[in-house]
Image (cartoon, coloured by chain):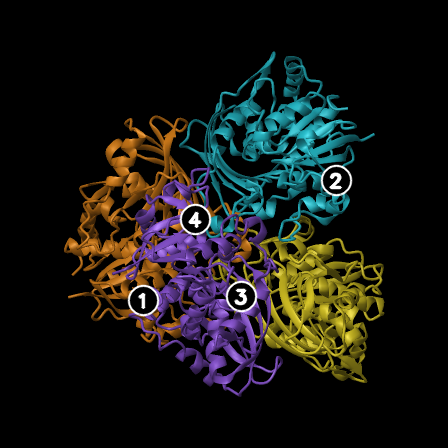
Chain colours: A purple, B yellow, C cyan, D orange
Amino acid sequence: MTIRCAVVGATGIAGQQFLAALHKHPLFDVVRLAASARSAGKSYRQAITRPSGQVAWWDAPEALERFGDMEVVEGSSMSLEGVQLVFSAVESEPARDLESRYAEHVPVISTASAFRYEPDVPILIPAINGDHAKLISVQRERRGWKGFVVPVANCTTTGLAIALAPLHQHFGVDKVIVTSLQATSGAGRSPGVISQDIVDNVVPYISKEEAKVAKETRKILGTLQGELINPADIRVSATCTRVAVLDGHTEAVTCSLKKPASIAEVKAALRAFGKDINPHTHPSAPQDWIWVHDDPFRPQPRLDRDAQGGMCTSVGRVREDDVLGDNGVKFVLVSHNTKMGAAKGAILVAEDLKSRGLIA
Amino acid sequence: MTIRCAVVGATGIAGQQFLAALHKHPLFDVVRLAASARSAGKSYRQAITRPSGQVAWWDAPEALERFGDMEVVEGSSMSLEGVQLVFSAVESEPARDLESRYAEHVPVISTASAFRYEPDVPILIPAINGDHAKLISVQRERRGWKGFVVPVANCTTTGLAIALAPLHQHFGVDKVIVTSLQATSGAGRSPGVISQDIVDNVVPYISKEEAKVAKETRKILGTLQGELINPADIRVSATCTRVAVLDGHTEAVTCSLKKPASIAEVKAALRAFGKDINPHTHPSAPQDWIWVHDDPFRPQPRLDRDAQGGMCTSVGRVREDDVLGDNGVKFVLVSHNTKMGAAKGAILVAEDLKSRGLIA
Amino acid sequence: MTIRCAVVGATGIAGQQFLAALHKHPLFDVVRLAASARSAGKSYRQAITRPSGQVAWWDAPEALERFGDMEVVEGSSMSLEGVQLVFSAVESEPARDLESRYAEHVPVISTASAFRYEPDVPILIPAINGDHAKLISVQRERRGWKGFVVPVANCTTTGLAIALAPLHQHFGVDKVIVTSLQATSGAGRSPGVISQDIVDNVVPYISKEEAKVAKETRKILGTLQGELINPADIRVSATCTRVAVLDGHTEAVTCSLKKPASIAEVKAALRAFGKDINPHTHPSAPQDWIWVHDDPFRPQPRLDRDAQGGMCTSVGRVREDDVLGDNGVKFVLVSHNTKMGAAKGAILVAEDLKSRGLIA
Amino acid sequence: MTIRCAVVGATGIAGQQFLAALHKHPLFDVVRLAASARSAGKSYRQAITRPSGQVAWWDAPEALERFGDMEVVEGSSMSLEGVQLVFSAVESEPARDLESRYAEHVPVISTASAFRYEPDVPILIPAINGDHAKLISVQRERRGWKGFVVPVANCTTTGLAIALAPLHQHFGVDKVIVTSLQATSGAGRSPGVISQDIVDNVVPYISKEEAKVAKETRKILGTLQGELINPADIRVSATCTRVAVLDGHTEAVTCSLKKPASIAEVKAALRAFGKDINPHTHPSAPQDWIWVHDDPFRPQPRLDRDAQGGMCTSVGRVREDDVLGDNGVKFVLVSHNTKMGAAKGAILVAEDLKSRGLIA
């Protein structure tokens, strides 16, 4: 009794991550692939073949074998017949219209930012704010949709929100200053980051990213009050940079807390986080939502990004800070930006909503 | 009438940078090269040739042609006959003894950290704290030396102190949170950073670096009061990381100021800094001590590290911050770690001390 | 009395290299910049600014300051009024039409491949086949052009042809097997090579490149007989790969010779090559067309690509081979693909044709 | 009934690969770890911890958890009590003595080159020359050993010999010209390749590697005649380079054959190779010894090195060559240098010798 899904934006990097994660998923079955007009009518394999002949597939070959011959349809005219759920990996601009159209009929879980900042749309990370799913009924009623749209967070927000969540819950987070060292896969592949820009280099700016991180963190860590999410009273200041790393965002975080907490207490709170998520209903969930390293040379993106299927946030260098504000704590985290931070994170949200009876 | 210099630790990466910078210097003439016992008695070229036969020279060929046949002597027994000045690029541990021995007789300008934290030793950056040179007479008297030791700052401190100096001077710096993305050349080459550790990766820790940055920044920006340097009342919190960049440290800086300053005023202060340094007496000084970019994608280490001979600190993304404290400002800087941040910075200090009559 | 030039395709990577090389050139003066319709009417700086705001300029800032405010016109409708010479860096497809149109009126030196294989078009490398310039009069007569088109070779061919030329001249080259390890800049920047494809990787194929190398090498090393170039009787087998190097193609070459030659004779022939080129008439020419290294760890692209302004071909590891055929020789070369192998190589051709009175 | 093994040289990169591969192996059980005097008496985890505190472990954490607390003994004084088999990953120089000492008592499978060129020592790759194992009895008798030494091939030879084996068997290989683009892990980690040497670069030389490739290929593909291996009559010419790839050697191979073979026949021979190896007795063997790609952009080291546990040799770009000699064929291969090319290849040899009753 699997749920029949469509993947829209299937040819891009996030779309590929959806297929790689779904091709043997116990709960979801991909029955339709959609992309832009340019790909429509082609087999999936043809659709991802460049003019040069190169097959632009970046993951394990099994998923490509499974989906390579499936026809790709155009996202804007895709039939939802027989589709119970849409995973959307389209760009944010087309997402606005496309996802609205799908959501009239079926649930949509999206990696796009189009709906993230709407008041009736939760940004879900199950171990943090699963209860925000209650907003879905508000969204449906207000918009007259049979389905709904739930976006996941920006990939840089995801790791930060997960690491802050237990601190906020136990001690209250007041201020946050974060510098991200982001992987190139976060920019997608059309064209993504060209090597001329990033080899032997750092790019100190990622357009719009810093504002997203601040805004989304407050919303995700906020509390649902009636029909509204009351954003967490956390001030976030971000500097987002790009480094020559293929996958895995590294973030250097300094925060201050509302209540005193020893480093041991902070580590204990981090380690205990997410243990209430049921692995049977959430097969994509990591065993450890947060892995805390004591070795000061960890986490490193190449060594830690794939921990627990790319779904575990690795934290290290937890130490005191006496500059930012009261009860200061500093740490470094690594989070896989295209797995937990995008497609696999969206699948985890779908698992959560299925467990709540919101997808069926 | 050039000054006759010895370069000690001449075979390492900082040593090579000394030779590359000195081989056509108008004021200094290299008359002696010293290194460890392993190199003693060899020609410089032999001394830098690995067992595999590879000549481990990393800079332009001209300097190697100039010095390749010069004999290398052992640092610990080097004669100072005919030597008026020692540039030291030895490791910090041997530096303690070696530099003391040399300083009994002649001035020593050093890239090592051995003496940086002694109360009678200034850490000089000419445009910032040239007046701290007055401490040299205290040092001489206290230690009974005819010469003296002046170290330059840690390479990560250098760029930070330069960018903060005009802000501190005009507006007063209160708090600083900095994340560094450091180049691999900063770790030297014996063995330095191996590619297995850094390709497609970030290393989130550099041993002892963060404490150095905090302590040195306060000392450099401090004020000389009688026979003591009164450290600046600036609180600095650093996270130092290593990225896959060959040269050029990038630093994401957030600071708060004691007085209000508009972004335009901050940029103006940065741009005006160092203009009083005389290029005739200081041939290594950059025309612009700080170059301020308006393009948000700058500075980038590969594009900006070599600006003005690697002596210019490039600053960009200057913007407000409302999290750290009052009058918050954020920016990103790039500073060449082995040029301004090491050997060429030391030569610039020598030029400055010569202009003050302390080297002759 | 400088020659007034237009640079077409000025916004791409080869176009930028033209501007970087021409902004202080003693013989040529850039009076017009052209690019595609998308750039037309903008200032050069605007034309190279990405939607994100990033100014996509990759070279020293001086040339951008010189040309940043110059208006860019559309290549297809560019007026040739006041233009004495066109440097073309357009893609090969539009080059066919555009360069024909320009050549009706003025000389065109091009980095595009469009005309390379036409029988009345020489591929010029001055030290090798300057005499092929005689074909220009055939071309003019046959096509009824007042100007002409002269393309430079493919960037991978350039280094190979230069290294083979003295061997062919002295000993006769018979067979050549070459593996190239090409830099990413060779693919341009629209989109060029994305980091996801090349970091921690090798791409074993470059579309059409291998056939170009074989065909062009034979033509360049061929002899002019009447109105035709008789290709050299050299068999070339190439495998072209892409590696994570920003600039500088490395090529591992094995060849067999028609006459015996000791390694010392081979090195002597390489070192003597190109010494008859006059630096006064050819200011872009390197002092040494070929630099022969004895250190087996050289040449390396990062250390050697910029030798002599990026115009010198560095050769090392010259040794015997006893597998390919009689009188076998193996070596490794490095050649700067966007300097000698593209824009600066084209400027050198223009200098040569000027010295022959063909450009005035 | 597993075989009790010692791993000598356990702290290096090949040693770690042994542990990573053996910690859950069905046939072999690690009962002793040995390394140099510096590590002796420490726990394995302590032994691989750098002075900086960094735990220099590069593989999955499970194996480190399994062996981290095991004591490391000194290789030169290691007791063989209770040890049935030694896996040796020591450097070639100490290997000569150490492996002799062990082989007096027990079988030794080694990644070192010390014994590779001895006439009574086979270099085994099971699918190619398993019958060379007969030489072991000669070796035992001649040396008076109860055990024996069997080395695996150099990592660059391994992929080449595997790809050539089916061609040699079916069509006869005559001449081979190969250029390798080798990964940095091949140089180990003490110090290995430093980033300053390889980022944005190619190193055109690897000491002694080219001669090894030629000599070993002939021996491995040779035929056992009585008590001697008659080397294959194949002439091999290699150029070995290092590129900025972490794992996986790429090799561009041109060869000529003694009998005509169409490209289809060549591909069929490659694909059929190794199918007689029994996966039950050889659990480390890949399902496909050679995977042939039709996509010209493959193989790529990052995408293909880990295929089938790093034990599969990936071949692509199979095409005709008309330069090297009769019946020319060109292709590109990728082989994992520390898996099939070192530790896991050695384990596969042990599995093969166990299946032959030579290890028990």
Q: Is residue A243 above or below residue B226?
A: above
Q: Is residue D61 above or below residue D211?
A: below
Q: Is residue C301 left or right of residue A57?
A: right
Q: Chain of mark 3?
A: A
In the image, C278 versus D266, the foreground residue is D266
Q: Which mark's residue is nearer the viewer, 2 or 4?
A: 4
Tell me which label, 4 or 1, sits earlier in the chain.
4
Q: Which mark's residue is nearer the viewer, 1 or 3?
A: 3
Check disc 2 and report the residue beneath it.
C71
Tell me which label, 1 or 3, sits earlier in the chain.
3
Cα distance in 3D space between marks 3 and 2:
41 Å
Cα distance in 3D space between marks 4 and 1:
28 Å
Tell me which label, 4 or 3, sits earlier in the chain.
4
Check disc 1 and report the residue beneath it.
A283
Mark 4 residue element: helix
Check disc 4 and report the residue beneath it.
A75
Of the numbered discs in the image, which one, if any, rests on residue C17? none
Q: Is residue B138 visible?
A: yes
In the image, D40 versus A229, the foreground residue is A229
